[in-house]
């Protein structure tokens, strides 16, 4: 990571990796950001969006991004972990998070079920003017907390799609782990049979019916029903009730957030 605090902003030069950090920092003077934008060759009249990438090896992920989004202006800088990716591009024909999720899953298949995995994960900030890039960077880091490598998790999450759910990004890891529902479902998933039940619950919350879930899991629908009945007994839920179904979906989301947040926190400790 570049130590930008010791550098004079008036000494910025073409190719200086600190320029992206200047653009992304909300503590820099506007004139310094304007100069950094100019030196990086960004078009000040076009919007940018910032991505936060968590991965053990960022190079292949940047290459994947460039292959997946041809013609887009991509620059990156490692700010501890995650790495910031700055993109300047026209409007996407499809949602960027869907494109990236599919591309990452294709090259990095999901970890064993009920595992948080180790990325790559991508948080995507909203499109903003180039001089508002710090806002998009903040949004990208918040969205990153929702990314997960579980089978039914999302590898790429767009801040703009979270809506009020983004408020959950303020919940500390310790609080997530202490949440009664998360603690209970983690306890259930501790055994092989329980982990299978939790996987089935995740699939049911995604697909919405016993038969569709059974088809996706390649089991009989009575097997799905039996597993869900066990989950209901342990969690004191009635999945036929809309409130309890919502509760199940929320608890699973919080659990994924806890798994990925623990990994992100560990990387920050290792990375200093």
Image (tube, helix red, strand yellow):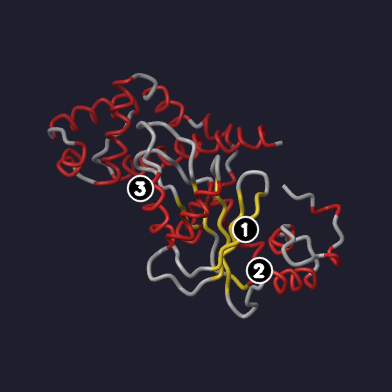
Instruction: Please indicate whether residue 66 sits to the left or right of residue 22 in the image.
Output: left
User: Going from the N terminus, do you reach mark 2 or mark 1 first?
Assistant: 2
Residue that badge 2 annotates:
132
Question: In the rendering, at what x and y percent does residue 116 appear?
Answer: 45, 34
Q: Which residue is mark 1?
A: 137
Q: 37 or 122: which is nearer to us?
A: 37
Q: Look at the picture and state if 228 lies above or below 244.
A: above
Q: Which residue is mark 3?
A: 106
Among the 4 quarters of the image, the one containing residue 36: bottom right
Q: Are marks 1 and 3 in contact (CB under 8 Å)?
A: no
Q: CA distance from mark 2 to mark 1?
A: 9 Å
Q: How far is disc 3 from disc 2 in space, using C-alphas? A: 33 Å
Q: Residue at point 74% right, 67% down?
A: 14
Quadrant assignment for the C terminus:
top right
Single out the mark in the foreground, 1 or 3.
3
> 19 or 199, which lies in front?
19
Left or right side of 141 for 251: left
Compared with residue 240, is residue 68 higher up or lower down, i.e. above or below? below
Q: Residue at x 52, y 54 (%)?
A: 62
Residue 133 x %, y %? 64, 65
Considering only order in the chain, which callout, 3 or 1, is on the residue closer to the N terminus? 3
Does dot 3 land on a helix, a strand or a loop? helix
Q: Quadrant of residue 197?
A: top left
Q: Are marks 3 and 2 in contact (CB under 8 Å)?
A: no
What's the residue at 43%, 58% (across, down)? 97
């Amino acid at each position: 990571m570049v130590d930008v605090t010791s550098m004079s902003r008036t000494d910025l030069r073409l190719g200086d990796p600190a320029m992206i950090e200047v653009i992304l920092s909300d503590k820099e003077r506007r004139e310094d950001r304007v100069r950094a934008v100019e030196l990086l060759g960004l078009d000040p009249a076009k919007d940018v969006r910032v991505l936060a990438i968590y991965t053990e090896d960022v190079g292949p992920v940047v290459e994947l991004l460039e292959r997946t989004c041809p013609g887009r202006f991509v620059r990156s800088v490692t700010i501890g972990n995650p790495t910031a990716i700055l993109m300047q591009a026209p409007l996407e024909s499809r949602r960027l998070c869907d494109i990236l999720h599919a591309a990452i899953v294709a090259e990095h298949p999901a970890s064993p079920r009920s595992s948080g995995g180790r990325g790559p994960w991508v948080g995507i900030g909203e499109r903003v003017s180039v001089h508002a890039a710090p806002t998009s960077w903040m949004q990208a880091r918040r969205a990153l907390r929702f990314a997960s490598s579980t089978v039914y998790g999302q590898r790429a999450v767009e801040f703009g799609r979270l809506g009020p759910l983004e408020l959950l990004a303020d919940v500390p890891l310790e609080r997530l782990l202490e949440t009664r529902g998360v603690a209970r479902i983690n306890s259930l998933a501790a055994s092989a049979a329980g982990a299978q039940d939790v996987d089935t619950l995740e699939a049911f919350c995604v697909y919405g019916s016993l038969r569709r879930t059974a088809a996706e899991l390649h089991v009989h629908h009575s097997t799905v029903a039996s597993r869900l009945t066990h989950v209901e007994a342990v969690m004191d839920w009635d999945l036929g009730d809309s409130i309890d179904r919502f509760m199940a979906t929320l608890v699973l989301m919080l659990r994924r957030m806890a798994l990925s947040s623990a990994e992100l926190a560990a990387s920050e400790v290792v990375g200093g």
